[in-house]
Image (tube, rainbow, N blue to C red):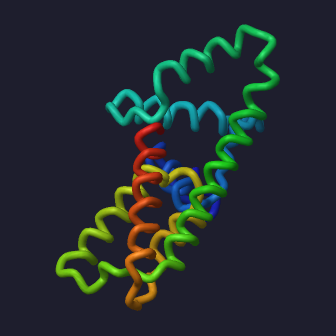
């Protein structure tokens, strides 16, 4: 139940709130228990069951193992730190990309390709922070670039593609 709008919400609504960068808390009305974890896990489970696999099988296996070992106390901090580093890295990458002049802006069809790539990045990283998604939508400056700039951009794009393929 959304107390801001006095409406009932679905799991998909909750997921959309989170993707928008909003904080959510789900509390049982009668007991006052915080049910946020259970619902977030349910959202992840539903996405995984629909073939939207975000977490590799070995990561899921390690998570299950962490509940039965002494590592349980280390895993939550490690995951929180890892996702924070991912959010910061994504934000810095988008900031850096927006500072480079765009040598391909004058090419026909480039803007459509750029929008498609931004949508792809946004869909991959959508749940990892709203600030970086806003940075991805920032307009790029329109200026001519030298061949060195083009090579630097190509290298960064190749590095980005390599990192994305490892996710």
- Residue 13 can be seen, yes or no: no
* 91 displayed left or right of 111: right
Viewer-proximal residue among 29 and 79: 79
Examine the rendered structure and indicate whether residue 49 appears above or below residue 14: above
Q: Left or right? Give the position of 62 relative to 33.
A: left
Which of the pair 8/89 is nearer the observer? 89
Residue 50 showing in the rendered view: yes
Residue 37 against residue 83 in the figure, above or below: above
Residue at 40% x, 50% y is 161
Instruction: Examine the image and state in which quarter residue 26 appears.
Output: top right
Which sits in the foreground, 12 or 155?
Answer: 155
For the point 66% across and 39% down, which residue is it?
Answer: 36
Q: Position of residue 130 (x, y in %)?
A: 57, 63
Q: Locate residue 154, reporting x and y percent.
A: 39, 63
Q: Residue shown at 79%/25% (left/top)?
A: 74
Q: Quadrant of residue 41?
A: top right
Percent of width and height locating residue 64? 61, 15
- Residue at the outermost bottom position: 143
Question: What residue do we see at 49% from left, 37% from top?
Answer: 43
Query: Is 99 situated above or below 72?
Result: below
């Amino acid at each position: 139940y959304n107390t801001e709008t006095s409406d009932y919400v679905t799991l998909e609504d909750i997921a959309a709130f989170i993707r928008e960068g909003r904080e959510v808390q789900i509390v049982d009305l009668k007991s006052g228990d915080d049910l946020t974890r259970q619902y977030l896990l349910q959202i992840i489970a539903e996405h995984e069951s629909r073939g939207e696999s975000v977490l590799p099988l070995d990561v899921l296996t390690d998570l299950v193992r962490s509940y039965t070992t002494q590592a349980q106390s280390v895993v939550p901090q490690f995951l929180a730190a890892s996702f924070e580093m991912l959010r910061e890295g994504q934000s810095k990458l988008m900031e850096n990309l927006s500072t480079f002049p765009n040598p391909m802006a004058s090419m026909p069809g480039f803007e459509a390709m750029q929008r498609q790539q931004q949508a792809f990045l946004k869909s991959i990283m959508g749940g990892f922070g709203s600030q970086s998604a806003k940075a991805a939508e920032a307009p790029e400056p329109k200026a001519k670039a030298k061949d060195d700039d083009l090579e630097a951009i190509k290298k960064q794009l190749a590095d980005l593609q390599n990192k994305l393929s490892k996710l």
